[in-house]
Amino acid sequence: MQDLAWSTDLEAARAGDRPALERVLGRSRQDLRRYAEHHCVVNDVEDAVQESLFTASRRLMDLRQLESFTSWLFRIVKRECNRMKRGLRRLMQEPITEDIAAVCTLEHRGLARDLAAAMESLPAHYREIVLLRDLEGLTIEELSQRLDLTREATKARLHRARSLAREYLKD
């Protein structure tokens, strides 16, 4: 991503050249989206990318070292994802509506809501492995084949996903 044209566009964008800024942000968008998919709730990915690009366009002049542009942009999107997750937690604390209440027994409502929020907070690749293992009951071997991972990588991903869910539930 760091070639001569990129550096030239980045410097021009920092100096206020709008077409150069559009080219830089346009080239960064796909990488930023892929990064956001691992840090955001699925429904928030595009919003986080849009907000991050907007923030970057406003704050590019504040960036001291242009060489750190990519990592700076990734930090912005990660911060945006975390901000959106905190907003989701607040929403999840809202009272359960009657259409949902009929499905849950009184003692399980809070747990069901907390588990759903924990699953929703996981990045897509972690959520997928937990759902396949714990809801669909796939074995480690079946997960490995389906996700095209080694057995060890499958176990590590499942462990990390469960750890993240536990962390979320501690809060």
Image (spheres, rainbow, N blue to C red):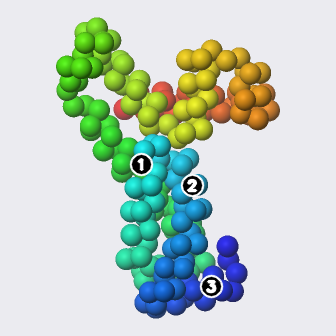
**Residue 44 marker:** 1
Task: Label 2, secondary structure: give it.
Answer: helix
| Up/down of 78 relative to 120, above or below | below
Task: Label 1, secondary structure: give it.
Answer: helix
Of pointers 2 and 1, the one earlier in the residue sequence: 2
Q: Is residue 38 left or right of residue 141?
A: left
| Up/down of 120 relative to 70, above or below | above
Residue at 46% in and 60% down: 49
> Three-letter amino acid code at disc 1?
Asp
User: Is there CB contact under 8 Å for labels 2 and 3?
Assistant: no
**Which residue is nearer to you in this view: 18 or 130?**
18
The CA span between labels 2 and 3 is 21 Å
Task: Label 3, secondary structure: give it.
Answer: helix
The CA span between labels 2 and 1 is 12 Å
| Between marks 2 and 1 in the image, the one whose residue lies nearer the viewer | 1
**Residue 35 marker:** 2
> Three-letter amino acid code at disc 3?
Ser
**Which residue is nearer to you in this view: 100 or 121?**
100
Q: Quadrant of the C terminus?
A: top left
Of pointers 3 and 1, the one earlier in the residue sequence: 3
Q: Is residue 52 left or right of residue 28?
A: left
Residue at 34% in and 23% down: 113
> Three-letter amino acid code at disc 2?
Tyr
**According to the image, label 3 marks what residue?**
7
| Up/down of 164 relative to 133, above or below | below
The picture quadrant where one finds residue 153 is top right
Task: Point out the residue furthest to the right here.
Answer: 150
Residue 13 in sight here: no
The CA span between labels 3 and 1 is 30 Å
Residue at 27% in and 20% down: 100
Q: Quadrant of the N terminus?
A: bottom right
